[in-house]
Amino acid sequence: QVQLVESGGGLVQAGGSLRLSCSASGRTFSTYAMGWFRQAPGKERLFVAGISMSGDFTLYADSVKGRFTISRDNAKNTVYLQMNSLKPEDTAVYYCAATLIATMTNLKLASLYGYWGQGTQVTVSS
């Protein structure tokens, strides 16, 4: 079992930056690949970024590539999402998730993540 708690969301103007954090407790954090997903009102939950257990492999949705960076600190049991050049269409609830079974080829599949945080709201104003 792992428990996930996101923080760092808020209101920001277009072009601004935010850094989300996801703190994990419970089972050994470094055994999980991690992902960030987001869900806008009335829309499905979408993959944003994923990172391997060691942090040496990352994957991004095309919509955030070049603007967002996922990273992790296994010593602190934390995964981060640095979001730059934010756009109004980035507005959503952002969720952190952990998986023991996803491989690097299917990190985008939400169904493979067994543990989810409660989400943090990100609002980008135009």
Image: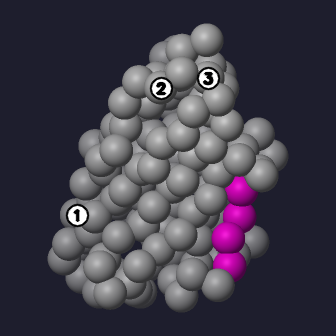
Q: Looking at the picture, which amino acid does disc 1 mark?
A: Gln
Q: Looking at the picture, which amino acid does disc 2 mark?
A: Val
Mark 3 nearby-residue class (10 Å; few <14, some 14–19, many ≥20): some
Q: CA distance from mark 2 to mark 3?
A: 7 Å
Residue at 62%, 59% in the rendered image = 69
Q: How is the image coloured?
A: one colour
Q: Looking at the picture, which amino acid does disc 3 mark?
A: Ala
Q: Which mark is residue 14?
A: 3
* Element type where label 2 sits in the image: strand
Q: Give the image location of residue 21, x and y in percent.
A: 37, 56
Q: CA distance from mark 3 to mark 1?
A: 32 Å
Q: Give the image location of residue 15, x and y in percent.
A: 65, 29
Quadrant hosting residue 86 = top right
Q: Is residue 55 above or below residue 68?
A: below
Point out the stretch of residues depicted in magenta.
57-61
Q: Is residue 39 magenta?
A: no
Q: Give the image location of residue 1, x and y in percent.
A: 23, 73
Residue carrying label 2? 12
Mark 1 nearby-residue class (10 Å; few <14, some 14–19, many ≥20): some
Q: Is residue 60 above or below residue 34?
A: above
Q: Are marks 2 and 1 in contact (CB under 8 Å)?
A: no
Residue carrying label 1? 3
